[in-house]
Image (cartoon, rainbow, N blue to C red):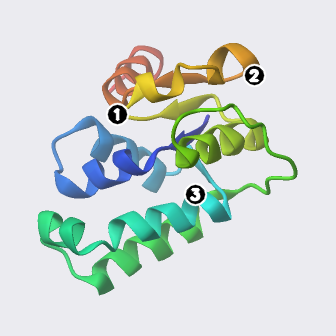
Amino acid sequence: MRIVADTNVLYQALRGQGGASHYILQLVKQSVVEKAVSVPVFLEYRDVLLRLKILHDLKITVEEIETVLRFIAYIAKAAQIHFLMRSHLRDESDNMVVDLAFASNSEFIVTNNVRDFQHKAESTFGGFAVVTPSEFVKQWRTHHGD
């Protein structure tokens, strides 16, 4: 199973060990869920996670964020975006996530901002569902136990 995780999911995974986002990151770490990444999405992760406010909120250093990013670069399934879907979502970073989901043949986009993706992404392209981390974990546990 392959997923695309929005930046806010990665942030939440780093923020606390008890939540669904952290559980998903553990599934990725165990290689039971494959995480797709593209250069634009990876750069978005880096840009957001290295903001001073985020570093302060997470109580984490730049070096620790760089370690997390190296882990993602190592473990994630790289996808090249050959053409842009231009799903016309309000936020360009959300368009990048849709492009990645489509190009990587992912089954899910996991995000805390499902409404941001409901404009046209699902209905236009199909092939993937847009779900919250909690919804993903619920579906995962229903089909795989745990």
Q: Is residue 91 left or right of residue 80?
A: left
Q: Is residue 91 above or below residue 124?
A: below
Query: Measuring 31% from the left and 86% from the top, which residue is drawn there?
Result: 63
Q: Position of residue 74 (x, y in %)?
A: 58, 70
Residue 143 vertical position relative to residue 45 in the rendered view, above or below: above
Task: Identify residue type, mark 1.
Answer: Asn
Residue 80 seen: yes
Mark 1 neighbour density, 10 Å: few (under 14) some (14–19) many (20 or more): some
Which residue is rendered at x = 78% and y = 42% of the image? 103
* Residue 82 higher or lower than 113, as above or below: below
Which residue has dot 1 on it? 112
Q: Residue furthest bottom?
A: 63
> In this figure, which residue is indicated by the disc labeled 3?
41
Mark 2 lies on residue: 125
Badge 2 amino acid: Phe
Q: Residues within 10 Å of mark 2 (few under 14, many from 20)?
A: some
Q: Tell me the SS state at disc 2.
A: helix
Direction from residue 37 to residue 15 in the image, left or right: left
Kindly identify the residue that appears in the image at 78 percent across and 37 percent down.
85
The answer to whether residue 26 is visible is no
Q: Quadrant of residue 94?
A: top right
Q: CA distance from mark 2 to mark 3?
A: 19 Å
- x and y percentages locating residue 124 in the rendered image: 73, 18
Extreme residue in the right direction: 82
Task: Tell which of 94 and 27 is nearer to you.
Answer: 94
